[in-house]
Amino acid sequence: MTVSSSLKPKRGLIAVAALAATLAVGSTLPASATPTTALDAEAAAHASTPQKASGARENAALRKGLNRLVTDDKYPAALAATVDRDGRTRNYAAGVADLKTGKKVPVDGQVRAGSNTKTFTAAVVLQLVGEGKVDLDAPIEKYLPNLVRGEGIDGNKIKVRQLLNHTSGLPNYTEFMMKDLFESPHTYYQPRTLLDIALEHKAQFAPGAGWAYSNTNYVLAGLLIEKVTGRPLDEQITRRVIEPAGLKKTYFPAVGEERIRGVHPKAYHAPKPGAPLVDVTEMDPSWGWAAGQIVSTPSDLNRFFKALFDGKLLKPAQVAQLRTTVPVPDSWSMKPGSRYGLGVTSVPLSCGGRMWGHGGDIPGHATRTGVTDDGRAAAIAATANAAPTVQGPENTQALLDTAFCKK
C-alpha cells in the first residue's frame, strides 16, 4: 500500500498534532515558552514517591522521567503503571491533582483515555467478525446502507477494515469543529451529527490509496456495532470488553455525563505552549464517542491491552487480524518504522522489539500505552493537553520507551 502525503510537522506518536486534527490522538496526513504557576515548587515537591501495587521492582528511570514531566515540562501531574514479565505491577505518580489547592495526585487516578477508546471499539468489531456477523472486507454500505455519501465518498467502496486501519480516506470531523469544542465544552453531540460534519467535506484520497488518521472512521465503526447488535455502543463495550477484562475503574460515560466518577486529578488545557492552563475537568465528551470517550486508569489500560493481545477478548484469528498492520508516515510518529493495525499501533523500541498499544490526547489528558509480546505493559498519563511546553509531548512518548528499555 502506498501512503500518501503532504505531511504535517512531527509532534509525537499518535498524534500530538493540533487537536483540530485529533481527537485524542492522531494527526491527519495529507493534510518554548513555559507556563509558571505559584504551585510549581509544590508540584515539584510532590514529584513522586513511587507506589508499589504487588511487588514489582521500581524503575528509577521511569520515576525520574515522570518527575521531569512535572518539573521541566510543567504538566500538573503525571501517572504511570507498569507490569513486568512475571505479571507484577507497580504504580507511580508525580505532581499535584489540583493546581489551586496543591493536593497530591492520586495513584492510578482516573483520566479520560481519549483515543485508546478506538482500541475498545475495534475489539468489539473484531468480536463480531469472530461471530460471523461482520466481514472485515465487506463494504460499510452492507451494514449502513445509504449513509456514507459525500464528495469522493461512497460507502460501497470503503471496507470495514479500512475504517479500522485508517485507510478509508474519510475526512476527520474534529478538524472542522475545533472552535465549537472550546467555546461550548458542555454541548452534547449525537454520533450522526459528528458523521454529518465529516461528510460535508471531500475525501482525502480514494479508499486504500493512502493513510490518514480520522476519528470519523471510528464513529462509523460505532454505528456499525449498534446496527449489527441492535444495542447501544456503551453497553456493548462494557459487556464485551470492560467486564470480561476485569477493568474496575474503566467506563464509557453516559449521555450527558460530564464529571469523572472516581478518584482523579483535575484536567488542564493550554491553548498553546506557554499559555495559562485552564481547568477542563468537566466537559461533555460525546464528541469523542466511539473514537475517544472512555475514562480509565493507567493500570486498567495495561490490563485491557494485555487481555487483548493475550487472546482473552478475541479468538486467535482475530488477534492475527488485529496485528495486521500498514505503514504510517514518520511525521505521524516519533519512531520510524511505526505501523498501524486494526485499532492498535506497532512501535519499535529503542532496545529492540516492538510495543503494541495506542494512546490518546483529549483536552485535559494525554495517555500513552504499550504492551510487548513477552508480557510487559506500561501506561503513562499526563494531566494536560495540549502540552504546557513544546517538548512535553515528545518527552511523554519517550518515557513510554523508557518504561520498557531502562531501569
Image (tube, rainbow, N blue to C red):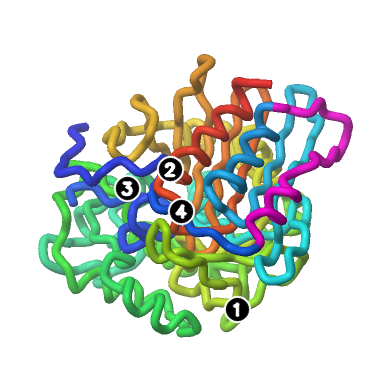
Amino acid type, mark 3: His
Say which label, 2 or 1, has the lower sequence index.
1
Is 238 rendered above or below residue 283? above
Is residue 389 toward the left or the right of residue 123 in the image?
left
Question: Which residue corresponds to mark 2?
Answer: 391
Q: Which mark is residue 350?
A: none
Q: Nearer the viewer, mark 2 or mark 1?
A: 2
Amino acid type, mark 1: Glu
- The CA span between labels 1 and 4 is 29 Å
Judge whether residue 209 can be spotted in this image. Answer: no
Q: Which mark is residue 258?
A: 1
Give the x, y percent position of residue 252.
Answer: 62, 66
- The CA span between labels 4 and 3 is 34 Å
Question: Which structural element holds mark 3?
Answer: loop
Residue 142 in which image quadrant: bottom left
Look at the image and say whether residue 53 sits in the magenta stretch: yes
Span of residues in magenta? 39-60
Say which label, 4 or 3, has the lower sequence index.
4
Residue 3 in which image quadrant: top left
Amino acid type, mark 4: Thr
Question: Which structural element holds mark 1?
Answer: loop
Give the x, y percent position of residue 293.
Answer: 53, 65
